[in-house]
Structures are given as structure tokens and as C-alpha cells.
Amino acid sequence: MEVLIDDSQESAHVDLPRLHQLAQALLLALKCPQHTELSIALVDDHEIRRLNREYRGKDASTDVLAFALQEVDGSSPRPLQAEGETGPPLLLGDIILSTETAQRQAAALEHTFEQELSRLFIHGLLHLLGYDHHTDEDAQRMDELQHTLFMQIDSPFGFTSASGVA
């Protein structure tokens, strides 16, 4: 699995190797094929606001944006079905995280910046896999899986089990 991380922000120190490890562990837990590729961008509020305005028509900063490169149905924890482990890369898409917003939300929610960044990354990844929160039922399914994955994180950017999510 290939995880590309671009850290263009200067407001927070992010342990990039541990974020990379978390991303790979979550891709495995969600049973994504080995040839999956994912991009993560760490940005400031100004940049995420620009992207939100340009791509979603919303002139406001946000915590996370997810741009999927594949249309998938997120009706189960394994929405991606791949033809074996070879072939062209399965390009999931891009997750954009605002570290400034993550810092504010971490303080408001009384947990660490690393925990908040992990929570936001999980949320973005689930969007790339087809999950959304347009209906109450969809939101509940996504929230439950997000919570399950978050609780499996042993320490910031650490994962307790590689056994995955059933």
C-alpha cells in the first residue's frame, strides 16, 4: 500500500512516519487491496478554505476534505472489491486535513491534537471508501465504524490490532 503525505503547513508538528503507519494499518483493517494508493495533505486553514470554496462552493474553512477518485457504495465495511492483489494501483483519492482546525477542535473536545488528527483522518478515509452522512441511517453507520476504528487506536497514530474490522 502506498501512502503519500504532503505537509505544507507550519502550525503543528506532525509525526509523519506514525501518520503513515496509521494510514497503512487502517487500510489493512478496512481490507483494502495491497495495491491501494492514498494521498494525505496537511494544510492550514487558509488553504483548506480555498479548496472548500473551489471544489464545494463553501467559503469557509473546515477540518477535513476528501476527494475520492472512485465511486463506491459504502454500504459495508468493505466497499472495495479488487481483482486479486496485482494489476494497476487502486487510487482511492486525497484526504486534506487542516492542522489549525484540528488543534482548535482537540482543545474544545479535550483530547490531544494527535487524537483529533487521527479522528479526522479516519473520517476522511471513510468518505473515500463511499461512506457519507447524508441521511440519519448513513450517518449512524459511518459514525459507528469511525468510532470502532478510533477505539482500536492504542496510542496516537498507533493501532492495537492488525486483525481488521469485520
Image (cartoon, helix red, strand yellow):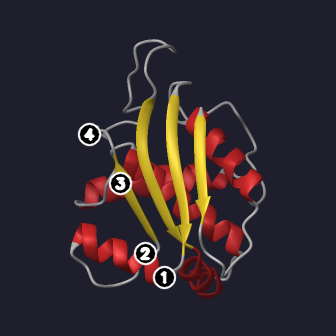
- 1 or 4: tag closer to the N-terminus: 1
Instruction: Identify the disc placed on residue 67.
Output: 3
Foreground: disc 4 or disc 3: 3
Contact? badges 2 and 1 (CB < 8 Å): yes
Mark 4, other Cα within 10 Å: few <14 / some 14–19 / many ≥20: few
- 1 or 3: tag closer to the N-terminus: 1
Mark 3, other Cα within 10 Å: few <14 / some 14–19 / many ≥20: some
Contact? badges 1 and 4 (CB < 8 Å): no
Q: What element carries label 1?
A: helix
Q: Position of residue 59 (x, y in %)?
A: 28, 84
Q: Name the residue under label 2.
A: 48
- 4 or 2: tag closer to the N-terminus: 2
Q: Mark 1 points at which residue?
A: 45
Looking at the image, residue 42 sits to the left or right of residue 50; the answer is right
Foreground: disc 1 or disc 4: 1
Above or below residue 62? Residue 141 is above
- Towards the viewer: 54 or 150: 54
- Towards the viewer: 79 or 63: 63
Amino acid type, label 2 = Ile
Amino acid type, label 4 = Glu
Instruction: Identify the disc placed on residue 71.
Output: 4
Q: Distance between the residues labelled 4 and 3?
A: 10 Å
Residue at x-position 61% and y-position 66%: 117
